[in-house]
Amino acid sequence: MTYGVSRLSSRSHLRETLSAYFYLLPAVLVLAVFRILPIVLSVRVSLYDWGMAGARAFVGFGNYLAVLQDPVFWKSLLNTGWYMALEVPATLVLSLVIAVLLNQKIRALGVYRTIYYLPVVTSIVAVSVVWRWILHPDRGLLNYVLSWVGLHGLRWLQDPRGLIQLVVGDTTNQLPYALRGPSVALCSLVMMGVWKGLGYNIVIFLAGLQNIPGTYYEAARIDGATRFRLFRSITWPLISPTTYYVLIMSSIVAFEAFAQVWIMTGPPAGGPLSTTKVVMYYFYENSFELWRLGYGASIAFFAFLIILGLTIFQRTVLERRVHYG
Amino acid sequence: MHRLGLNKLPIHLLLILGSVAMVLPFFWMVSTSLKTPLEALRFPPTWFPSSPQFQNYVEVFRQIPLWRYMGNTLLVTFATLAGVLVTGLFAAYAFARFRFFGREVLFMVFLALMMIPLPVYLVPSYMILFRLGWIDTYLAMIVPWVVNIFGIFLLRQHFRQLPQDLFDAARIDGCSRFSTLFHVVIPLSKAPLVTIAVFNVIGSWNSFFWPLIVTHSDTIRPLQVGLAYFSREQSTNYTLLMAATTMAIVPLVLLFFVAQKQIIQSQARSGLKE
């Protein structure tokens, strides 16, 4: 790195430092007040039984212990886990397949890209309102389309039964919650989430694919490589940084799913039978509906720990498999 | 040239099938918005409204202050963008082009803050805004978001790649650091600035969680929060709901069609950055 004149006197270095701080001041000020200070305060709030009108009592780690013993918290964590476990791989595979298809130098590439990207620019609120109508059990478009092929359709957003429960045929709720699988309602949210996020990931993958030099494929083809072999040995390793990026971004988006729960499920939101109550919603419910601010802050810290853990896992375990250039 | 050498007809069939799945919800939204309440509930449904009810769109304006919501969203979107560009340009310029005490540490702090999930600072931010008397004002929706750390990161990467000769030449011509930023750096940074602007406009136009919490009154609410509440109140009146939803997405969809090349390229670019 070069910074202008190679030898700086300590006085001009001081002047440069001062003016740098001046340039940084607006950003630092906002971040200090709305990011750093809140994080510090958050620790404090989490140690109190902090109610709405400022009523508070010091409880130490009581909130954290209570959260750990709260079955609804664990349920919301499991729901978030299911949501991520379904949505992230589905989005990844589908968007990669479509991006590979779009990378065949086909006609009307721009048209396809625009169409697939359309849900990305529309708000999650609008999309949730529309999908709730599409998934309407009696009047919905989806059940109508399914009826063409003789399928009965489901009460999508109202069905609390788990997928495994559906397959096993246990309607008496004898399986423990964790073994019932994600509820039909939660899967409906996943379905919409995949539809919504596909276009973004397609565009990212397409950019990655177009960065691969065509000569690699030609050389391999001369050597008699099969299509599968081309994908396996050239495409897949060379887009691994992109895959890694898509994986991280879509994991975060999935973890933070909130608006769709607020709008599409319930009343009460998070239903049926709390099977769509994800961590973000449970945090919101405690903090801003029940105004249990201390309890909410403790949930937030557990959410933070989980995101941190996921990121560290992805950094250390997955990044080693990423092939850069 | 085919990259993987697949046959094209089945590819088009697959892509068209996918496209239909992508567009169908939007078609259904517009179609329902033009039906009578009775026709909307008919099963099996009709694909096209038998007599389009354009008055549904007028009725929405009678029920909710949609212009007001849109005005609020526009104000918040552009005020936020202005703030993001100003704070971002200055901070990135300092990080990329100044040598000062604590630079690396401070930059690490910025990056670390990017990793903190929203819930951690949401509750205390609410308290701070409450103390400032900003709850239920535009300031609450704008000020906390006038720093975009990812934007600073993008700009810093770009500024660092600009050749040193440019800065030396500007200095010899008598440019101060400040005017170098305006006359040399900014004109050469259109691509990252557009990227940041695109991200920010789409982000603030669609933001929901934060304004849901910091606004209480109908006059201050942005479009998305207004629509969400309307959807709760009108959970059975699907024709009006779809008309309101259509109007809530039209501005951004129009923007998308006008600037789609820019939007898609900047998204793709941001994914390629390390």
Image (cartoon, coloured by chain):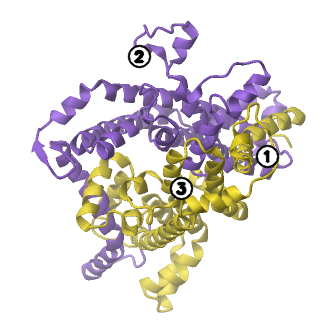
Q: Which residue is mark 2?
A: A177
Residues at marks 2 and 3 on the same chain = no
Q: Amino acid at mark 1?
A: Pro
Task: Compute the Cα span from label 2 to label 3.
Answer: 35 Å
Q: Residues within 10 Å of mark 2 (few under 14, many from 20)?
A: some
The yellow-coloured chain is labelled: B
Q: Secondary structure at mark 3?
A: helix
Residue A163 visible in the snapshot: yes
Q: Secondary structure at mark 2?
A: helix
Q: Is residue B256 above or below residue B48?
A: below
Q: Which residue is mark 1?
A: B49
The numbered dot on residue B168 is none
Q: Residues within 10 Å of mark 1 (few under 14, many from 20)?
A: some
Determine the residue positioned at 58% across, 44% down. Answer: A129
Q: Which residue is mark 3?
A: B206
Decide which of tag 1 and tag 3 comes sooner along the chain.
1
The purple-coloured chain is labelled: A
Which of the 4 quarters of the picture holds residue B219?
bottom left
Residue A218 visible in the snapshot: no
Q: Secondary structure at mark 1?
A: loop
Q: Amino acid at mark 3?
A: Asn
Task: Compute the Cα span from label 1 to label 3.
Answer: 29 Å
